[in-house]
C-alpha cells in the first residue's frame, strides 16, 4: 500500500512535465525498464535532465525513480562529460526473505562519467554510480546503491541503441545483508524527440 502511494506521488510530481523529449526502453530475459526524460532547462539553469522511470522483473521486484542530472561541458577533454545529480528511488523487494516483501526507499546522490570517441562520434560509453547512505534510506533498508556501465551507438539522429549492465541493491535492516532488486545485462533503445 505504501509503495502505491509513493508511486502515485511521483507520477503527480512528474505530470506537469508530461511532454518528454526522450523515451528509453530496455529489456533483458528477466526484466523490463522504461524511462522518460526531458530537458529541465526551464526549471534549472544549465544542461540538465529530469527523468522518471520504472523497472519490473520476473522476481516481482519493482523499482521506481525520479531524478535530476546536471551535465558539465567537455572543457579541455573533448568527448569526456561529467554529470552529477540526485534521485529518489522506491522499491518493493519480493521474497528476499521467503514469503515477505520489503518496502524500501532512498534519496541517492551520484553521477555519470561519459566518453564519446572522437574518431566515431556516434559511439560512446558511460559509467554511473548513485548511493543513498543510512540517513537518506527509509523503510526496511539502511543503504542503497545503483550503478551501471553502458555503450551506445547512434543509429540516426535521435535514435540510439545500447547494451548496459546495471545493478540496484539495498541493505536490509532485518538481516544485515544486501538484497539485489535487479542486476543484469540489458539491450535498449533511446528515442529522442
Image: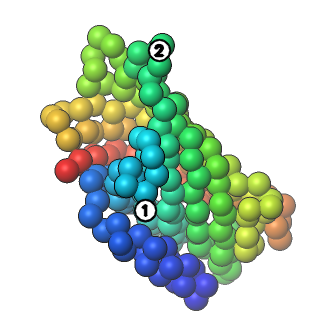
Horizontal and vertical percent for residue 149?
49, 35
Q: Is residue 131 left or right of residue 29?
A: right
Which quadrant holds residue 38? bottom left
Mark 1 falls on what kind of element? strand
Q: Judge the density around disc 2: few (<14), some (14-19), many (≥20) Cα neighbours within 10 Å.
A: few
- Apparent side of residue 84 relative to residue 12 in the rendered image (left or right): right
Horizontally, residue 105 falls left or right of residue 163, namely right
Which residue: 51% across, 63% down?
65
Residue behind mark 2: 77
Between tags 1 and 2, which lies in front? Answer: 2
Determine the image quadrant of residue 108. Answer: bottom right
Residue 57 in view: no
Check residue 52 in the rendering and tell me which mark sits there, or answer none: 1
Q: Nearer the viewer, residue 51 or 122?
A: 51
Farthest residue, direction bottom: 1
Q: Quadrant of the N terminus?
A: bottom right
Q: Between disc 1 and disc 2, whose residue precedes? A: 1
Quick one: SS at disc 2? loop
Furthest residue to the left? 156
Query: Mark 1 touching mark 2, by CB under 8 A?
Result: no
Q: How many marks?
A: 2
- Residue 3 location, x and y as percent? 57, 80
Quadrant of the rendered image containing residue 12:
bottom left
Mark sitting on residue 8: none
Q: Residues within 10 Å of mark 1 (few under 14, many from 20)?
A: many
Mark 1 vs mark 2, CA separation in Å: 30 Å
Residue at 58% across, 62% down: 88
Q: Which residue is found at the position 68% from the left and 74% from the top?
A: 102
| Left or right of residue 104, residue 118 in this image | left
Q: Position of residue 107 (x, y in %)?
A: 65, 60
Amino acid at each position: 500500500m505504501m509503495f502505491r502511494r509513493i508511486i502515485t506521488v511521483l507520477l503527480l510530481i512528474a505530470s506537469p512535465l508530461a511532454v518528454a523529449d526522450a523515451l528509453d526502453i530496455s529489456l533483458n530475459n528477466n526484466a523490463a525498464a522504461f524511462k522518460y526524460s526531458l530537458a529541465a532547462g526551464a526549471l534549472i539553469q544549465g544542461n540538465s535532465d529530469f527523468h522518471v522511470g520504472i523497472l519490473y522483473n520476473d522476481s516481482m521486484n519493482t523499482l521506481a525513480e525520479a531524478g535530476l542530472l546536471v551535465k558539465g561541458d567537455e572543457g579541455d577533454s573533448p568527448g569526456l562529460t561529467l554529470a552529477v545529480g540526485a534521485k529518489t528511488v522506491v522499491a518493493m523487494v519480493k521474497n528476499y526473505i521467503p514469503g515477505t516483501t520489503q518496502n524500501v526507499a532512498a534519496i541517492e546522490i551520484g553521477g555519470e562519467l561519459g566518453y564519446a570517441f572522437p574518431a566515431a562520434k556516434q559511439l560512446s560509453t558511460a559509467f554511473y554510480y548513485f548511493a543513498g547512505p543510512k540517513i537518506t534510506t527509509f523503510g526496511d533498508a539502511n543503504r542503497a546503491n545503483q550503478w551501471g556501465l553502458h555503450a551506445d551507438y547512434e543509429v540516426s539522429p535521435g535514435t540510439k541503441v545500447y547494451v548496459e549492465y546495471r545493478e540496484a541493491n539495498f541493505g536490509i535492516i532485518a538481516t544485515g545483508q544486501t538484497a539485489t532488486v535487479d542486476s543484469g545485462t540489458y539491450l535498449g533503445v533511446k528515442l529522442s524527440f
